[in-house]
Image (cartoon, coloured by chain):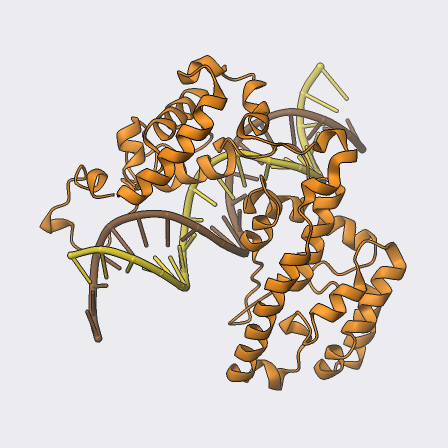
Chain colours: A orange, B yellow, C brown
Amino acid sequence: MLGVRHLLTYSVDDMGRQPCCDKLEVKKGPWTADEDKKLINFLLTNGQCCWRAVPKLAGLRRCGKSCRLRWTNYLRPDLKRGLLTETEEQIVIDLHSRLGNRSTHGLLCVRWSMIAAKLPGRTDNEIKNHWNTHIKKKLLKMGIDPITHEPLNKQAASQENSSPASQHFTQSDNNHQVEETDGVLNSEENSVSSPTGDNESLLPDSICSDDSLMNSLWLDQTSLMDALWASIPEPDAENNNNENDMPLSSWEDNSAWLLDSKDFGVHDFGFNCFSEIESSTLQTLGMEEKGQ
DNA sequence: AAAACCAGCAACCGCTGTCGT
DNA sequence: TACGACAGCGGTTGCTGGTTT
């Protein structure tokens, strides 16, 4: 880290928070194949380091943040490409029902990163996009509110009653309805793992306004989540019947999309064999991070 | 054939948490 | 303890390609 950081020219005048990049000279918009090539070459050679220094060192006129995003969401070799499978979708829906709408100040807040962590090769951005474009509509079509995961008709009825407290007690019933309707969600698990109700929106105002109580609820759920995640199978293990979803055993397998890329070839990156890089790169990444 | 509309996705923006000094 | 740098996260935007009129 220090090795890279000393390359940056800070001065006393720089005191105060700097913008993450020089807005005037930074390029925005879609990445070109050449930029991708530079970034990949740099990261494979040097490993991930201080992102702010990456564009400078890699010869890119990009914001460090932009480089990180491009790498993590698109260029990372261990990414899966293509649409989410049915199994993956189900996991996303299930986790969303438990993690979604977690809010500290009444703001919508979905833990996409936590969901993504359970889907190897998928990024939070990808899952978020897939949710907004596909799953949301799917659920609405099925008559399920994508935010609360309650059946829409039931929600409308409870809204008519306009009693927030009454919503809290409809959760387990709703889960059963979901199972009866489509069989997608395992409602028994849902109800067991969410004894307190998952969504703040389902809780009475009096409870939501009680910080200490909400904290304890959250802590309970956190431990529950640990147990839950341990019980969730890795999607790959289940998807063997799907030809598009064969388990990818190695970096090389996961990089198939790179080999197929029409924009640039493997040799453009300056290396010939991904498998050689797989171990060395990962080692480098780890060592570089430690060494910084 | 052209314009309007729509859906999907990549990328950006702003905020927050963490770490180092 | 305060402050700045940085990485990471989630919501939003805007571009692009496809479809409909």
**A77 displayed left or right of A47:** right
Quadrant occupied by the N terminus of chain A: top left
**B8 displayed left or right of A156:** left
Tell me what residue is drawn at x 27 percent, y 40 percent.
A22
Q: Where A213 falls versus A144 (above or below)?
A: below
Quadrant occupied by the C terminus of chain A: top left
**B20 displayed left or right of A121:** left
Residue A231 location in percent, x, y? Answer: 68, 57
Marker count (numbered): 0
Residue B17 location in percent, x, y? Answer: 40, 63
**Looking at the image, which is closer to me, A151 or A8?**
A8
Q: Where A292 falls versus A107 (above or below)?
A: above
Tell me what residue is drawn at x 70 percent, y 41 percent.
A237
Residue A156 can be seen, yes or no: no
Tell me what residue is drawn at x 83 percent, y 61 percent.
A178
Q: Where A277 falls versus A96 (above or below)?
A: above
Tell me what residue is drawn at x 71 percent, y 81 percent.
A164
Q: Quadrant of residue A245?
A: top right
Outermost residue to the left:
A12
